[in-house]
Amino acid sequence: MNKLQDELRPEYDMRTLLKGSVRGKYAERYRAGTNLVLLEPDVARAFQSAEAVNEALRLVLQLTKLAVSKQPGLAEAL
């Protein structure tokens, strides 16, 4: 089979699929630095929403800062 030959099924007509689409619709959001993180299934089950994940991570950051400030030399180890 020629590599240039189209392998898409006929029902996946790109002219139909892309009808009404907007080029670069999410480009600005991408440039803004959106970060996505894939959680392992066991970790994802522990949280009900993205907000809950963010809240937990902010708490971890606060606790880390607190531990570093209370233990001399720990900051250099991290």
Image (cartoon, rainbow, N blue to C red):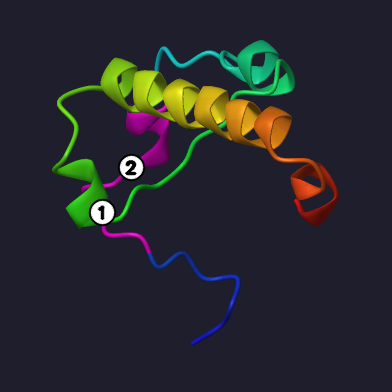
Residue 77: image quadrant is bottom right
Task: Measure the C-alpha gap from mark 1 to mark 2.
Answer: 6 Å
The amino acid type found where label 2 is placed reads Asp
The answer to whether residue 24 is seen in the rendering is no
Which residue does the image show at 40% across and 39% down from the upper left?
Answer: 14
**SS type, badge 1:** loop
Disc 1 marks which residue? 10
Chief secondary structure of the magenta span? loop
Q: Is residue 31 left or right of residue 8?
A: right
Looking at the image, residue 57 lies above or below residue 25? below
As shown in the figure, which amino acid type bears the numbered disc 1? Pro
Q: Residue at x 57, y 17 (%)?
A: 26
Q: Nearer the viewer, residue 28 or 7?
A: 28
- Percent of width and height locating residue 54: 40, 22
**Position in image of residue 74 (x %, y %):** 75, 47
Could you say which quadrant of the image residue 62 lies in?
A: top right
Mark 1 near mark 2, Cβ–Cβ under 8 Å? yes
Determine whether the residue tagged by mark 2 lies in a helix, strand or loop.
Answer: loop
The quarter of the picture where residue 15 lies is top left
Q: Is residue 18 left or right of residue 46?
A: right
Q: Residues within 10 Å of mark 1 (few under 14, many from 20)?
A: few
Above or below, 1 against 49 in this view is below
41 displayed left or right of 37? left
Please indicate whether residue 48 sits to the left or right of residue 39 in the image. Answer: left
Residue depicted at 22% across the width and 22% down the height? 49
- The residue segment tinted magenta is 8-18
Q: Position of residue 42 (x, y in %)?
A: 19, 55
* Residue drawn at point x = 79 percent, y = 43 percent: 75
Residue 14 is inside the magenta segment? yes
Was residue 66 drawn as part of the magenta stretch in this picture? no
Residue designated by label 2: 13
Residue 48, given in percent of the width and then of the height, sits at 15, 26
